[in-house]
Amino acid sequence: MNVKCFLILLMVVMVSCATNLKRLPEGGFRPKIPNFKLAKLPFKLKNNVIDTNTVYYELELDRDFRISYFDTSFYFYRFFSNGRVYVSKMFYKIPTDDADYNELKSGYIGYYKIEDNNKLIIETFEPINLGKFVIRYGTIKGDSIIIHSEDNSKLFFGLTDAKMDIEDLSLVKLKSPKINLYSKPDW
């Protein structure tokens, strides 16, 4: 009986020490140790290649061909002029309330960097596998952003996953002046 208790206690300690998650009362997650690589670099937004006064949408189409089921979901990205980026929680329709666009606690937080005037690097913290930092690489083309690949920096107990190409993911800029963006990042 003592061996079982010891093993259970040891497992609890190992899991609680390995997690890099801090849960927020609003439902989101933040890293206990914010070890963003892009946060260490000085940031200056040049030439306004990214519009920081609007949002960019990512559309996901979920398909189940067995039952002819199609479902769409949306995420939006907000880029800030100080190098921060916010990726929203999932929505099943485009939000119409300003509060949805200004609530920065329930999605993913991160940083971005622009190189060569159109190469974009986005680093976010995601509450997967006890918390991990994900870096995505893309290209800015007009009002759109094409994400080409991603790098999962820490999967579990320090194991790393190599940079991998992904199916191109498009982020499209919202062209509606109706949204009032007033919140500021606090990370």
Image: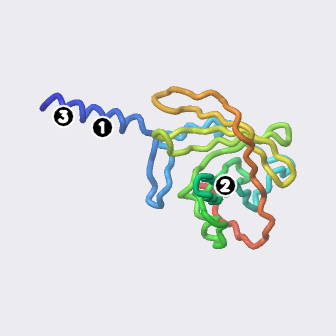
**Residue at (80, 42) in percent of width and height:** 139
Q: Amino acid under label 3?
A: Cys
Residue at the extreme left: 1
Quarter of the view holding residue 13: top left
Q: Amino acid under label 1?
A: Val
Q: Position of residue 39 (x, y in %)?
A: 64, 40
Compare residues 174 and 43 and report the one nearer the observer: 174
Sequence-wise first label, 3 or 1: 3
**Residue at (53, 38) in percent of width and height:** 132
Sequence-wise first label, 1 or 2: 1
What residue is pinned by disc 1?
Answer: 12
Q: Where is residue 172 in the image (x, y as percent from the top left)?
A: 77, 56
What residue is pinned by disc 2?
Answer: 61
Q: Is mark 1 on a helix, strand or loop?
A: helix
**Residue at (70, 70) in percent of width and height:** 180
Compare residues 146 and 72 and report the one nearer the observer: 72
Q: Are marks 3 and 1 in contact (CB under 8 Å)?
A: no
Answer above or below: position of 172 versus 164.
below
Sequence-wise first label, 3 or 2: 3
Residue 5, label in figure: 3
Q: Distance between the residues labelled 1 and 2?
A: 38 Å
Quarter of the view holding residue 10: top left
- Residue 182: tell me if it is visible: yes
Label 2 Cα neighbours within 10 Å, binned few <14 / some 14-19 / many ≥20:
few
Q: How far apart are marks 3 and 1 (CA)?
A: 11 Å
Q: Position of residue 166 (x, y in %)?
A: 69, 38
**Residue at (57, 38) in percent of width and height:** 133
- Residue 42: tell me if it is visible: no
